[in-house]
Image: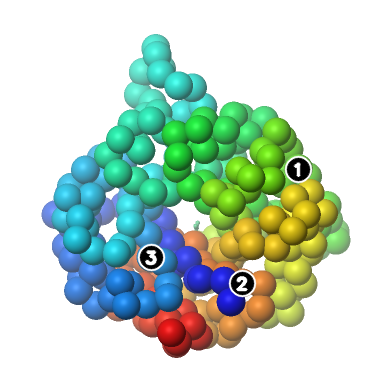
Amino acid sequence: MRKYLIAANWKMNLNKTEAISLAKEIDKDTNPLNSNVDVTICSPYIHIPELIDYLMYSAISVGAQNCNENEKGAFTGEISSEMIKSYGCEYVIIGHSERRQIYNENNELINEKIKIALKNELKVILCIGESLEERKSDKTNLILNSQLKEALVNITSDLIENIIIAYEPIWAIGTGITPTLSEINETHNAIRNYLIEIFGSKGINTPILYGGSLNDKNASDILKIKEVNGGLIGGASLNSDSFVKIVKIAESYTEL
Ligand code: PGA
């Protein structure tokens, strides 16, 4: 069985005091050192150094929510993947639908970001997802496959080991609405088949997370689905009780 990854996406929330106290609560109530579940907090950049210090002896890792596609240079206001790595982050989210929609990131740019993040030895959480219109017109698999194909250009099968896919239907993010369990099951199976088609047997092990209104109420059903290997959690990760409950549900499915 693949190890679950439960990833918090804090987005642009929490001031310094709030961020540290939420991390403390999550750390106190989870014990990933003794568990078969990986837990990571993808934080706003500015909190990363403090979180890394605070979580130094914890098994909870820290991630970023984005990175620039260049190595370094005159890109005012940007953060490079090398900087992120140098602070001790393990993960970086790339291609979140908010970045695609609000900041016009396309698959080509996302591919550049993935390549530089992998070069700097970060694990990439690559987000893909369809709009409601695309789902209603039966284009979901077509859209997801083209997002995967274009975002993963020149990513060889040995590099895919450091990539995690997060399937996040755009219409489910922050709305309280999720696809049905059978839709999630079908879509994750289709993603799995496509990964195997591109990467052969290496595609079998790529974790596929579900994201979009995942919470402590629906996590037991969603995480039970065979090809759901964890979750990317926005709103429910801002509350330690609900986030910890989701971690515990994943733990209960992977007793050591
Ligand atoms: P949500 O966000 O859990 O608040 O729907 C998920 C995400 O955007 O990663």
Which quarter of the figure has residue 216? bottom left
Q: Earlier in the sequence, mark 1 or mark 3?
A: 3
Which color scheme does this rendered protein use?
A: rainbow
Q: Type of residue at label 1?
A: Lys
How many neighbours does mark 3 have within 10 angstroms: few (below 14), some (14-19), or many (20 or more)? many
Cα gap from disc 2 to disc 1, whole angstroms? 20 Å
At a point 64% along the width and 62% down the height, the residue shown is: 205
Q: Which residue is mark 3?
A: 39
Instruction: Give coordinates of residue 82: x percent, y percent.
Output: 38, 30
Cα gap from disc 3 to disc 2, whole angstroms? 15 Å
At a point 46% along the width and 29% down the height, the residue shown is: 68
Q: Quadrant of the C terminus?
A: bottom left
Q: Type of residue at label 3?
A: Val
Q: Residue 104 has which mark?
A: none
At a point 32% along the width and 77% down the height, the residue shown is: 34
Q: Which residue is mark 2?
A: 228
Q: Earlier in the sequence, mark 2 or mark 1?
A: 1
How many neighbours does mark 2 have within 10 angstroms: few (below 14), some (14-19), or many (20 or more)? many
At a point 45% along the width and 39% down the height, the residue shown is: 121
Q: Nearer the viewer, residue 84 or 135?
A: 84
Q: Residue 149 has which mark?
A: 1
**Viewed as shown, does residue 2 lie left or right of 17?**
right
Q: Earlier in the sequence, mark 3 or mark 2?
A: 3
Q: Are marks 3 and 2 in contact (CB under 8 Å)?
A: no
Q: Are marks 2 and 1 in contact (CB under 8 Å)?
A: no
User: Circle 2 sits in a helix, a strand or a loop, which is it?
Assistant: loop
Q: Nearer the viewer, residue 191 or 202?
A: 202
Q: Type of residue at label 2?
A: Val
Cα gap from disc 1 to disc 3, whole angstroms? 28 Å
